[in-house]
Every structure is written in C-alpha cells, then in structure tokens.
Amino acid sequence: ILSAGCSSHEKLLIGGYNWDKLAIIDKETNEIEWVHQLQKEDDGVNDVELTRDGNILFAYEGGARLINKAHEVIWDFKVEKDQKQELYTATELPSGEFLLAVCAHPSRIITLNSNGEKVKEQNFDSGIENIHGQFRQIYPTKDDTYLIPLMNKGEVIELSQSSEVLRRIQVGGNPFSAKVMADGNWLVACGDGHKFVIADPLSGSIIKTVTDDDILNQSLLFVAETELTSNGNFMFANWNGHSDDKIQAKIIEIDSKNRIVWTLAPSDKITNVSAFYSF
C-alpha cells in the first residue's frame, strides 16, 4: 500500500466523523503519505481499516466501502437511508468476510462475502429509540460473540449469535468502542464521558479509569476509538466535534503510567479523527 520511497515506520490509517478525507500518516514524522477525498455524502466515517490484501475499508454514515490505494471502488454497501438507518462498523473477519453493523429498528449485524454481497444478517434490539444514539464500533470476539457499546445507555453488552445478552456492564459516558484485551478484560472508549476504562467482564466492575486528570497537559474531549498497542501503551482518538476546543491532540498515546509518548498534533490538514488503524 505504501508508495515508492516511503519508510518502514509504523503507519496510521485515519478517518473521522465530520472530516471529508481519509489519510495515511507516518507515525514517526506525522507526515501525510496518502489522502483519499470522500464524496460529499460519505461524511460520517467512524471506522477505518487496512485489509489483509492491502485495501482500505471504511464505514461512513450511509454505508461501507472497500477501495484500493488507487481510489478505485471494489464494493460499496449502502443502508436504506429512507428508513433513517446509519452504519458505523466495518471490519474484516478472519474468514476474509466483512462484518458491518447498522443502527436501525431493529439493529442489524451483517456479514458480507469478499465481493461485498450479503451472506448473513442478525437482528437485535438495542433498546435505544434514537438511531444516531445506538452504537458506533461493534467488536466481534474470538468466541463468536459481539461487544456492543450502547451509546445512549452508557453501557457495553456482549451479544450471542442468537441475540442473547450474555453480559452487561455500565461504563458511563456514551461509549464508542469496546475491545477485548489479551487478558480478557474490555477496553472501552467512553465518548463524552471524557475517559476510557478497563472493565472486568467476569465481575462486571471497572478496574481502571483514565481521564484528563491523569494525563499531563492534554484535555480529553470525545474519547473515540481506543486500543492497546503491541508494546502495552494505550492509543485513543480525541475527537473534537462536540467541543469548541480545537487545540488538543487528535490522537494520543500514553504508557501504562499515563505518560504521553506520542501525539498527532492539530493541523489545518486533519480536521477530526475518531477512528484509526495501525500497521
């Protein structure tokens, strides 16, 4: 995916709700190496990913799309906009298929084949009337369940393939993403709760909370996608779409003692970041 002459530094594919571009940056230099201009109707990106084939997968409010580095569309799945549906999850499964999740009544988890054709659909009731407040990133687990951060309920549920709620944990805020860590705990980004937390799914308790009181010289705005990096750090998108504060870092990486080790500084080229993918 990298153009000739690019270094082998860690890269980040980034996108964001209310930003009209996707970009790849070199994490060491913060330089932009590739930009994809979104179509006007695509504004609303909340999930981005580099596939195993080197293509770029992203979810936008009206659907999900797979493109190549040359900006050519491989497939484009659209929601039923006349039904006021929204789509914010798009991820590649180990099988090579793709998982999408649609905010709707009922909410839907959809599996596409490699050609972007629907092969499976699972409906569930989020219990949230406001479609925009249902969820953002749904995470498929190795146990064939789904972690679903329910925004307007401030909680994360684990859902079975038969749409049974197996676990439910209150985390506060309006959670954006929830991921299973290597130790089995859940890492949850809490949106306008201005924090991320680690929850123990066995006890249902919160065992770690990080707010801007814990991080020197940075304000946590809407804490969007959050992940545990391969070296044990925490990286999270600091989306500013609900705040007049535009001077905070777009992405922040901290170590286990909450010390900042890297940031993506504000710039006029990158408006909002709510989703990223490291490679």
Image: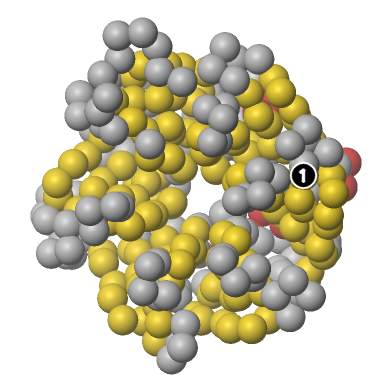
Residue 104 placement (x, y as % from top left): 79, 56
Can residue 120 be spotted in the picture?
Answer: yes
Relative side of 121 to 26, left or right: right
Asked if 255 appears above or below 241 in the picture, the reply is below
Going 30% across and 15% down the picture, which residue do you hit? 6
Going 42% across and 61% down the picture, which residue do you hit? 189
Name of the residue lying farthest toward the top: 4
Query: Which residue position is annotated with label 1?
Result: 112
Residue 94 placement (x, y as % from top left): 60, 51
Residue 226 placement (x, y as % from top left): 39, 54
Q: Which residue is at the front of the view, 111 or 242?
A: 111
Residue 43 placement (x, y as % from top left): 61, 30
Relative side of 138 to 121, left or right: left
Relative side of 95 to 53, left or right: right
Asked if 82 appears above or below 13 in the picture, the reply is below
Name of the residue lying farthest toward the bottom: 203
Sort mark 1 into few (<14), some (14-19) or many (20+) by Cα contacts within 10 Å. some
Going 26% across and 67% down the picture, which residue do you hit? 210
Can residue 56 be spotted in the picture?
Answer: no
Image quadrant where residue 161 sits: bottom right
Going 75% across and 28% down the picture, which residue do you hit? 75
Asked if 168 appears above or below 173 in the picture, the reply is below
How many marks the image carries: the answer is 1
Name of the residue lying farthest toward the front: 95
For mark 1, give the secondary structure.
Answer: strand
Q: Which residue is at the front of the view, 227 or 3?
A: 3
Relative side of 15 to 128, left or right: left
Q: Quadrant of the C terminus?
A: top left
How did the renderer colour the structure?
A: secondary structure
Residue type (three-letter) at the residue carrying disc 1: Leu
